[in-house]
Amino acid sequence: MKIKTRNVSTEYVLSLQEPKKRPLKKPSFLFQTLVRIFSIPDLIATKFTYTKERMEQAGKGPYLVLMNHSSFIDLKIASKILYPKPYYIVSTTDALVGKEWLMRKIGCIPTRKFTADVSLLKNMLQAVKEKKVSVLMFPEAGYSFDGRTTTLPSGLGSLLKKLDVPVISVITEGAFLRQPLYNNLKLRKVKVSARVNCLLTREEIAEKSVEELDGILEKTFSFDNFKTQFEKRIVVDAPDRAEGLNRVLYRCPHCRVEGKMLGEGVTLKCQSCGKEYVMDEYGSLQATEGETEFSHIPDWYEWQRECVIKELEDDSYKMELDVDVAVIADYKALYTIGKGKLVHTKDGFTLESEDKKIRYEHSPLASYGLNADYAWYEMGDTICVGDKKRLYYCFPTKKDVVTKARFATEEIYKRLKGVLKEK
C-alpha cells in the first residue's frame, strides 16, 4: 500500500492552510458494501470465524465498537461483523491523503494519533447522538510492535461516559501472526478469528466509575500473540519469519550493542558479537550457541524498555538522527521536503529542516505515545511528530531506532505525569 507524495519546498509547505472542518455525513451504504465485498477473499483465505457473547444485551445500537489493531485485515474483519449496519471509523489523518472523498464516503473520521482531540469527541458524539450511527475505534491507535497491547490512553472510561452507548469489543486472534508489522506486512498462512462481546451496556457504564471502566478496558485489551502462538502450537512456517525482527529486538542481550541485530530468514543475529538466535515455527527464540537470554520475544522487548528507563534515570538518554522529512498539511498529498535533524531528549523532540526554515519543538507532554511505524506506506521506518497544523514524518537514515524512540516517549510522559500528580 502506498501514499500519494509530492516533492516540494519548505516554503510551499509553510504556506499551506489547515484543511477546513467538514460536516459529518452519514457513511455511504454503497461504499461500505464495496468494502464488504472486497474483504471476502482475505476472510476466506484466513478461514475467518467469530463468536458472539452477550450481544443480546447490546440492543439495536448505535454502539462504540472497540477493536484491537494488528494488521490490514482488521477493517475487513470489522466489515464482516458490522455490515450491513452503518458505522463510522476513527482513522489516522494519513489514511485520507490523496483519497479524502473516498475515505469519508466509507465513514472515516480523521484524527491525530496519541493526542487529545476535542474535534474527534465532537464528531463521535454527533455520530451516536444525532446520526444514530455506531463508531468503530482502535483504542491502541497504532499497530502492535511485539504482538501485545500498544499503550492505551488514560481516561477512556470518561469517553464511554460521555458517549453513553453500549460498548462492543472485538478482539482478534491470528491477525498479528498472519501479517506482523516488523515483517514488512508479508502475508502468512494463519487462521484468523475474533471474539465479539457486549463489553458494557449503558446501565453498566452509568453505574461504574471512570477508573473501573479503564480497568475493564485494560483487562480486555490484554493479550500476547506470541504467547498464544506458543501455547496453542500455532505453526508459522514461513521461511522468512524472522526477517525484520531486528526492528523489534534492536539491542543484543549478550553484548548489549544497539542497532547491530539482523533478522534474515529464520535467524536473528548480532553483527557485533556474532550471537545468533533461531525463531522456530511457534514464535520462540533459541540461541544456536550458549545461553538463550530471552526465548519469548516480548520479554526481550521489555528488557530493552528497562534499558531505556535506566538511561532516563541517569540522564544519559539522547537520540540525534539524520532524517528525511515529509509533511502532512492537508489531504492532497504527503509533501517530501528533503533532509533534516531530529533530536529526542527528556525535554521532547526537536526537528529542524536542513534549510533551517522549519524548526518544530514537540513537548514531552504533547502525547502519551509515539506515532511510529515500520515500513510506513513502503517508504521506511518513521517517527511522526506534529500538531494540528502539520504532521512531520521523519525517516531516520540510521536503522532500528523507532522502537527505542517509542519506549522513551512513553516513559518520559509517564515520569512527567507522575511528577505533576505529586504536586
Image (spheres, rainbow, N blue to C red):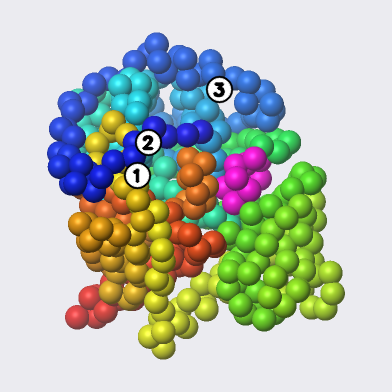
User: Measured along the vertical axis of the image, is residue 68 above or below residue 58?
Assistant: below
The residue at 76%/59% (across/down) is 267
- Out of 224 and 271, give the one closest to the viewer: 271
Mark 1 lies on a secondary structure that is strand
- Of badges 3 and 2, nearer the viewer stands 2
Q: In the image, 296: left or right of 195?
A: right
Q: Position of residue 25 (x, y in %)?
A: 24, 21
The furthest residue to the bottom: 314
Find residue 5 and name its label: 2
Mark 3 lies on a secondary structure that is helix
Which of the marked residues, 1 or 2, is nearer the chain's N terminus? 2
Q: Is residue 221 magenta?
A: no
Which of the marked residues, 1 or 3, is nearer the chain's N terminus? 3
* Residue 357 visible in rendering: yes
Q: In the image, 130: left or right of 96?
A: left
Q: Is residue 180 magenta?
A: yes
Which range of residues does the magenta coloring cover? 176-186
Location of residue 357 (image quadrant): bottom left
The residue at 52%/28% (across/down) is 76
- In the image, what residue type sits under mark 3? Ser
Q: Position of residue 21 (x, y in %)?
A: 16, 32
Find residue 336 and name its label: 1
- Of badges 1 and 3, nearer the viewer stands 1
